[in-house]
Image (cartoon, rainbow, N blue to C red):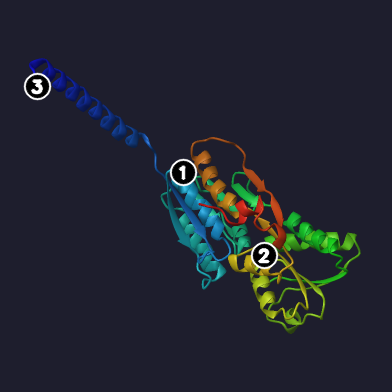
Amino acid sequence: MGKSEKAAFILVTTILVCLLGVIIVRTLSARDDVRVYRVSIITDDVQGDYSQNIWKGLDRAARDYNIDLQVIALHSGMTTEQQRSSLERELEADTDAIIINLQQNPSLSEQLDLSSITVPVISLGTVWNGSSAIRSISTDDTEMGRMLANEMIHDGVTHCVIRASLDNARIRMREAGFVDVMQQQGVDYTTEWDASSAAWSNLPSGVAVAALDEPALESLVGMRKNGQHLLYGIGYTNALLSYLESGSIRRLIVEDDFAMGYLSLKSAVDAIENRNTEYGQILSCYVADAAHLYDEPLRHILFPIS
């Protein structure tokens, strides 16, 4: 190798080393500029049986927005008072924002005093009554009840029974929407909320059944024999979708849980950064049946890829 070739080689090598050094410095500087948001989610859905896609949406948003997500569980064995005390302790923790996800006991939100909370609070699944400062990501439960009633009427149902296992504000709104449509259309109905009573499981042969929550649906599917009852419901799990596909359940009214989880974290970041003043986002709900289970938009909603 001649002198000129050696000089050229040394020059090129020097330039490459300098460029590599610049890239490394910029990369390290960029990492220093990226903020990690600390967000706590307080939930009473410990096992996630009824909100698997919500957790997928939360996980995806945590990766997209660089969020350190801390999960605080309110166990079902706690009394309401114990859950409230635990929740209020967590509200005082050092965090940038708080998401409250009360699936089993949404009425607990009405007992909380949030007047001293200085960080953004986002309600996942329910509209927070009594405070316009709380952001919420939810669906219209009254409309879900109306949709369920209209699907049953479309199928020619003239008499039905209503069943629910959870007694809270969300389920009562579903009942109100359902009953409103049935009364307008002159459809007879009876209702039973006590799942431990004999009346709850005493279903006349051939009657159509409207289940207003997932636990009620799961119980009713187990009781259904030889197609005696037309079963409709609100909500879904993977198991319930299998029953829908097999024909054991006629139709389900479902919400976009993945979007709900994702948007709750996005809303938290918007609030931390003082962006987007939209405090209440109400998402659409959809009719799911076996024939269209894998069509869009249902495929994207029910089987999201996180």
Outermost residue, right side: 186
Q: What amino acid is found at the position of numbered circle 2 in the picture?
A: Asn
Three-letter code for the amino acid on which mark 1 is drawn: Asp
- Give yes or no for contact between labels 3 and 2 (Cβ–Cβ under 8 Å): no
Residue pointed to by mark 1: 64
| Left or right, residue 15 beside residue 66 | left
- The residue singled out by tag 2 in the image is 168
Q: Is residue 175 left or right of residue 296?
A: right
Q: Earlier in the sequence, mark 1 or mark 3?
A: 3
Nearest to the observer: residue 55 or residue 10: 10
> Quick check: marks 2 and 1 in contact, CB under 8 Å?
no
Residue 13, by quadrant, is top left
Residue bearing mark 3: 1
**Residue furthest out toward the bottom:** 198
Q: Residue at x 59, y 65 (%)?
A: 238
Horizontal side of residue 157 vs 27, given as left or right: right
> Could you tell which of marks 2 and 1 lies nearer the N-terminus?
1
Q: Which percent across, then down, holds residue 213?
A: 67, 66
Q: Is residue 72 above or below residue 203?
A: above
Q: Mark 2 vs mark 1: give the one in front.
A: 1
Is residue 115 among the parts visible in the rendering?
Answer: no
| Residue lying at 16% horizontally and 18% vertically, measured from the top left | 8
x and y percentages locating residue 262 in the rendered image: 54, 48
Q: Total number of numbered labels? A: 3
